[in-house]
Each structure stands twice: as C-alpha cells, then as structure tokens.
Amino acid sequence: MKKILIIEDDKLISSLVQFRLKKDGYETHLVADGNEGILAIDALIPDLIITDVMMPFRSGIEIIHHAKQSQPDTPIIVLSSLGEEEQVVLEAFNLGVADFVPKPFNPNELAIRVKRILK
C-alpha cells in the first residue's frame, strides 16, 4: 500500500483529500504545519507528499527543500491558492515538484493526478 503524506493546515481541505485518497486504497497521514511535515517526511518515508505552500512555522518551499535533500525521488504535489504566489510556484517547479494543483480544486481531479504520479 502506497503511503501519502498530506501537509495542509486547512482541516477541511486535508480531511477531504484524506477521505478521497483512502477511498482509492492509499495509506494517508495528515500533519497540519511545516514543522510536523518535516518530522513526518523523515519518520514515514512516504511514497508521495502533498503539501500546501503557505503554512505555520515553515513554508511549503522549506518542506520541498527538505524532502528533495532527504528523499530526492519522492514525488511532491503542491497545493496553493491561485494568484497567491506565482514566484513561489515557479520556485517549487524549479526544485523538482511533480505537479501543482490550484485551490479550490476537485478532490477527484487530485486523485487522478496522484494515481498518474504513483504509477
């Protein structure tokens, strides 16, 4: 079973994502801030990371930096509000993220992207 780490401070979004991905048979783990996210990356060694950009304590960019140093082959999907930070999204892609999903999003579309990445 593939492990997915969801790093998202919005409880409604993280619950929706977790519910949808569990339905597809993935093992999901939720954390609500950047510090917890970095600890969870090292503890879980996930098959996929889904992270928000703007979070308490550490940003999504810091999470991506850490993940790419400790587990360079783990794919990352970035969630972010449109217009929030075009430059940050560009930086995320430059760091090697697999995909970007603008908020608000359809959980089914995210599930399709997850399945494609984890093939």
Image: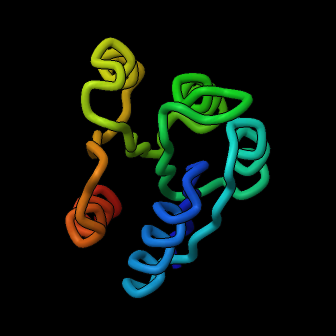
Q: Is residue 85 above or below residue 30?
A: above
Q: Residue at x 37, y 83 (%)?
A: 24
Note whether 3 is above or below 91 in the view shown. below
From the viewer's perspective, tell me whether residue 80 is left or right of residue 56.
left
Q: Position of residue 73 (x, y in %)?
A: 47, 40
Q: Residue at x 68, y 55 (%)?
A: 31
Count of all numbered marks drawn on residues in the image = 0
Q: Quadrant of the C terminus?
A: bottom left
- Seen at 60% across and 35% down, the residue is 55
**Which residue is at the front of the view, 33 or 114?**
33
Residue 16 lies, in percent from the top left, at: 44, 72
Where's residue 28, x and y in %?
Answer: 57, 71
> Vertical placement of 18 versus 102: above or below?
below
110 to the left or right of 42 = left
Q: Is residue 9 left or right of residue 38?
A: left
Q: Residue at x 52, y 79 (%)?
A: 1
Residue 32 in the image, given as x and y percentages of width and height: 68, 51
When asked about the image quadrant of residue 115, the answer is bottom left
